[in-house]
Amino acid sequence: MNQERTFHIPVPAPFRFEECLWFLDRNYDDCMHTIQDQTIVKALQYEGNMILIRISKAPDGLDVSLLEGHWAPAMQQWIEAYIHDWFDLGRDITPFYQLLQKQKKLSYMTDAFHGLRLLGIPDLFEALCWSIIGQQINLSFAYRLKRRLTEHYGQHMLHNGVAYYVFPEYATLAGADISHLRDMQFSQKKAEYLQGLAAVFDSGDLSKASLVTMGSFEAQQQALTALRGIGIWTANYALMKSLRVAEAIPYGDVGLLQGLVNHGLIKDRKDQAGIDRLFHKFKDWETYLVFYLWRSLAVPA
DNA sequence: CTCCAGGGCAAAT
DNA sequence: ATTTGCCATGGA
């Protein structure tokens, strides 16, 4: 083992480590990170090599330690950029809180969920795969499917005898056997969607960079929904989590609808006009509202 | 047993 | 143009 390196990342207020930790540790068996003693342990790929980091709460920010992997001069900056993206640290969310304060039924959130950041999925391929996996099935089963996929096709590194994985690369999944995915209990359709998506990434026809270049939300959404297995919900979920497009509302999301009904914000799940009216008031902060409504589902009614 | 989960697609009205 | 059946599994 190499010498452990630690560095500090400052965070902008409002930020609360425990609220972010809630999202990352919701009783689901997520194989993309582990929570140990109120710290986050996650494997990453830096220039093709596996590294393992630990993120913990520190005064005025976060402390990040390199647990495994060879330290490189530019690595700290790279990790810092990754965490900035993941935790959405480059954003001033006080305008969102001002909008929440204007809504009688939502104003409690600025205290109750104070400092919660929209936790993202920086890698677009992973975000899309995850949103396809999560279609229509309960989350615990979805996490189980993701774990099987990752533990078979993803790279890992050992730390104290425990394996830590990164999500499979598209080049690997492009060559995956449909029948093998079926054995992992993916439906025939989802197996085809995942492999097809991996092939599109592998061909170079789609990348996060190319999508960013498109600029307009409509063009990005159109490019994604043109692919098999990606509808409005999946496209917007990925744009929300990876490209952080504020207006990429995952329409039809059952959790979102439940949150809206719970707060008495819409008459019923088909009240599209009510949904549009509410989100219009949260211009530029639509997906933050979605995320906070998801957060509210974990609070006993 | 039935219903439905962080939907999407294709076939049938 | 809009609705319906289907997928896969498991928890409620």
Image (tube, coloured by chain):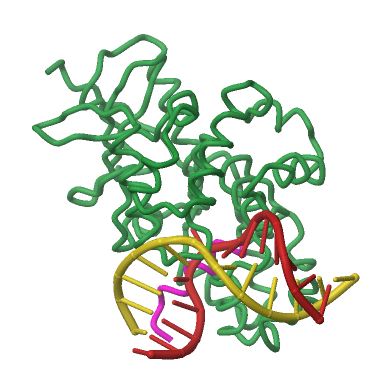
Chain colours: A green, B red, C yellow
What residue is rendered at 67% in x and 83% in y? A265
Q: Which quadrant would residue A267 be assigned to in this image?
A: bottom right
What residue is rendered at 57% in x and 29% in y? A199
- Say left or right for A203 vs A112: right
Whether residue A13 appears in magenta in the rendering, the answer is no
What residue is rendered at 74% in x and 74% in y? A275
**Residue furthest top in the image:** A73
Quadrant containing the C terminus of chain A is bottom left
- Say left or right for A225 vs A148: right
Is residue A165 shown above or below A285? above
What residue is rendered at 48% in x and 48% in y? A130
In magenta, the rendered stretch is A289-301
- Say left or right for A253 vs A155: right
Q: Main secondary structure of the magenta part?
A: helix
Is residue A272 shown above or below A212? below
Question: How far across and down, in percent of the image, does residue A44 sit?
Answer: 36, 28
Whether residue A296 appears in magenta in the rendering, the answer is yes
Is residue A90 shown above or below A155? below
A37 or A132, nearer to the observer: A132
A45 or C2, nearer to the observer: C2
Q: Which quadrant would residue A209 be assigned to in this image?
A: top right
**Residue furthest left in the image:** A161
Is residue A109 shown above or below A245? below
